[in-house]
């Protein structure tokens, strides 16, 4: 069996990666998305540190590939609040200035603020939560939830005025809906 085929089999079986059973494709797009996720969630001081974090997620890259990826993503080194130089990538959307990763309190505060402004209702069933917002606002709230990196949420799907949140726990939808409603009410 070839080494490449064996690696593909490991990924297909959910083995061979540190990503909790999630198969991580070895594509440029998946690698770029994971790099952005890592840089937005934690301070990364060096390419070797980033390479290790990617390897922990099952993405093995050479230094040359990582350097090229950082260049393609527009990553730069900026000083964080502690004065350390860390990698940052331009924000998605209109504001393209690189930003350091949000701290838990800042991301939770942003999520709470947007929930207070945009959340109309939250309804849970098993591990699913359906959130309603005014027309055109679902993407903003979904982005804030994604940026907050809430461990209990596997993912969000947003339409125009509706979001679907998927809880990691099979019966975690009700607690998640309660948490988001609580955040929204604190803001008012």
Image (tube, rainbow, N blue to C red):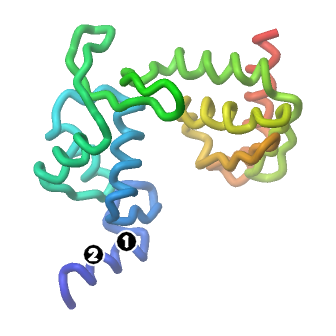
Q: Quadrant of residue 29?
A: bottom left
Badge number at residue 20: none
Q: Quadrant of the C terminus?
A: top right
Where does the image place residue 19, in percent across and percent down from the top left? 41, 55
Where residue 125 appears, as percent x and y from the top left, is 83, 51
The answer to whether residue 187 is above or below residue 148 is above
The structure residue drawn at horizontal position 53% and vertical position 15%, both measured from the top left corner, is 105
Q: In this rendering, would 95 be left or right of 157?
A: left
As displayed, is residue 162 above or below residue 93? below
Instruction: Report if the CB atoms under discs 1 and 2 are less than 8 Å apart.
Output: yes
Residue corresponding to mark 1: 11
Residue drawn at 81 percent across, 28 percent down: 119
| Secondary structure category for the residue under label 1 | helix
* Left or right: 183 as drawn, with respect to 51: right
Kindly identify the residue that appears in the image at 18 percent across and 80 percent down: 3
Write down the quadrant of residue 183 in the picture: top right
Residue extending farthest to the bottom is: 1
The answer to whether 96 appears left or right of 70 in the picture is right
Q: Which residue is mark 2?
A: 7
């Amino acid at each position: 069996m070839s080494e490449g085929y064996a690696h593909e089999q490991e990924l297909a079986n959910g083995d061979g990666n540190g990503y909790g059973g999630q198969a991580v494709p070895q594509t440029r797009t998946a690698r770029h998305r994971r790099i952005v996720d890592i840089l937005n969630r934690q301070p990364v001081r060096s390419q070797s540190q980033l390479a290790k974090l990617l390897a922990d997620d099952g993405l093995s890259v050479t230094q040359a590939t990582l350097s090229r990826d950082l260049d393609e993503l527009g990553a730069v080194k900026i000083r964080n609040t502690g004065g350390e130089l860390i990698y940052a990538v331009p924000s998605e959307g209109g504001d393209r200035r690189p930003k350091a990763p949000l701290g838990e309190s800042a991301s939770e505060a942003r999520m709470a603020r947007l929930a207070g402004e945009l959340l109309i209702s939250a309804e849970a069933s098993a591990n699913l939560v359906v959130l309603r917002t005014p027309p055109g606002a679902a993407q903003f709230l979904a982005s804030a939830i994604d940026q907050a990196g809430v461990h209990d949420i596997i993912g969000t799907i947003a339409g125009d005025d509706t979001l679907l949140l998927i809880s990691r726990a099979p019966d975690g939808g009700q607690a998640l809906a309660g948490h988001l409603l609580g955040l929204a009410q604190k803001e008012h």
